[in-house]
Image (cartoon, rainbow, N blue to C red):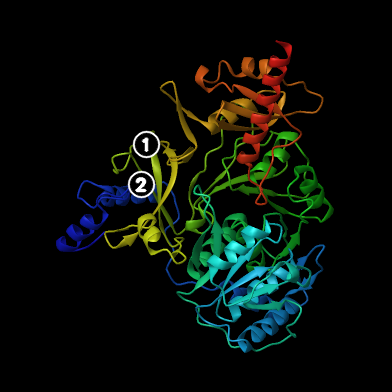
Amino acid sequence: MGGRTGERGSAEGQLRGRTVLPVRSTGISRAVRRRVVRLRRAGRPEVISAEFEPVWSRIAAWARDRPDSLAVCGDGGDVTYGELWSRAQGLARLLGEHGVGADDRVVLVCSRGVEFVVAALATWLAGSAYVPLDPAMPARRLETIVDEARTSAVLASPEHLATVRRRELVISTADGSPGEDLSPPTLQPQPAYVVFTSGTTGTPKGVVVPHSGLSNLVRWSVARHGLDENDRVLHTFGLGFDGAMLELWPTLWAGATLVTCSDLCRVVGDFVAEEAVANSCTVVWAATAIAEQVLSKGLDLPGVRLLLTGGDALKVRPSESAGYQVINHYGPTEATVVTTSHVVEPGSGLGPPPIGTPITGVEIALCGPDDLAVHDGEVGEILIGGHGLALGYLGDAARTAEAFPTVGGRRWYRSGDLAVRDADGVLHFRGRKDNEQLKLNGQRIELGEIEAALLELPQVMAACAVMTEAGLGALVVPRSEQQVDERSVRGGIKDRLPWAAYPKWVVTARAVPLTPNGKADRAAVVQLVLARRTTILERVRHHD
């Protein structure tokens, strides 16, 4: 990492006082260099060139060479590559006629499957970035994000037009006539999409991701997962969740078929498995909580070769008899969805699966409390560099500068996530700096460790630990016909956790509450735990 002495001194002065990387000869800049070299020597692929091929260009090639091949299918209808490209070009032309073009943003409020893919492609062909929203999200949050996005237009499926009460331009995805020969836009370094995420603050923030980062992700995914035109990939992630990028664009880049899983089925493991088998899918993507349901129940997936998961800390491994490979993925939205991946070894008693090693084009360093690189085996914050970095937060230069410091002339992202690197260069997730780690009676406790211990109990199929105003609580989902109570839970984990980590309140339920993105809804679990506490206290008072 180069830079003149005067520049280094100036950068250090600008960064001092923030929780960012210091610039000094013994600091992270040199440590990052050492870590990158070590990872490469361990067999990590070299960082790819900054040159990229936009995703839509491959889809155009499939439309030209194999126009009758099935691109997308599901409840929303089927479409071939030729039809998909023609519809996208017609809708892009309509956007252009309304003045939508370069540097604009288009909100998508579309149904899963054909409508969404057509709208996203059309936005790109118009030279704009799309802002994906899940029509199922609460109306107030949807309106808030539309306001924050400061968009030029809204593209909505006919059935969702009534939900978009905006003064801005609203266009139905059904309005565009099929078209062709639209001049391709110049994309670099334009944004590809803007995903709004609350993160840990609860305030929506728009993460702006460029085409180059998306192209890097897609090329890696196609190569790593071995996707080709013979694959059928099940699409289960929520449309407002950046994980959907991993289902949509690698599938279409590879000329494969995207199989849309309905909103009624995509958040229940049994239904996901049924959909995968019924639609002859070879690859299944599932949010962590859904994948854990599939793995905990030992559901059979004949014909499926890959179960791919991400979005939360995975705590369950496949059984020895599983006929498919499980790959775990980790990455923040600010680093284009995936930063690391790992093939999960089958078997129990091995502890939570690692998050793995960096994907092609991405670099990782771990930073300790003193802002210096940590040694192997020590916990450090994950810092991410390389081609996957987002451009920043929409309309928030101050937050962008803090989260994406420039060190030695290069940008990094401070994730706030913690990990340990083992002697083989493999990363193991250790929660977050802000809200996943607790300290009770002088002992550091991680919610993920509590959940992992609960899942080792034979009578527990799923678990979610939370901190409430009344103390530690846990929600557990019993296996079929298994009895679970607080005494059996505490007795089962007494040799696995320090006493301070024992849940004070235990709630049983048929399933862990999930957000629309398929993640554990901890806020809902807190309310269930508090309701359980209230019920118990009322019984005690009544008895007295």
Q: Earlier in the sequence, mark 2 or mark 1?
A: 2
| Disc 1 residue type (three-letter) | Asp
Residue 79 appears left or right of 476: right
* For discs 2 and 1, the disc positioned in front in the rendered view: 1
- Reply above or below: 224 against 327: below
Say whether residue 193 is visible.
Answer: no
Badge 2: residue crowd in 10 Å (few <14, some 14–19, many ≥20): some
Q: What number is the disc on residue 431?
A: none
Residue at 73% in and 21% down: 484
Along the line of sight, which residue is nearer the eye, 472 or 219? 472
| Disc 2 residue type (three-letter) | Arg
Residue highlighted by disc 2? 38
- Dot 1: what SS? loop
Residue 137 appears left or right of 26: right
Along the line of sight, which residue is nearer the eye, 401 or 329? 401
| Res. 347 image quadrant | top right
Say whether residue 330 is visible.
Answer: yes
Q: What number is the disc on residue 376?
A: 1
Where does the N terminus fall, quadrant-wise?
Answer: bottom left
Badge 1: residue crowd in 10 Å (few <14, some 14–19, many ≥20): some
- Reply above or below: 440 against 37: above
- Reply above or below: 129 against 295: below
Q: Determine whether label 2 and label 1 are within 8 Å by CB.
A: no
- Dot 2: what SS? helix
Report x, y in % for residue 449. 54, 29
Q: How many marks?
A: 2
Report x, y in % for residue 377. 39, 33
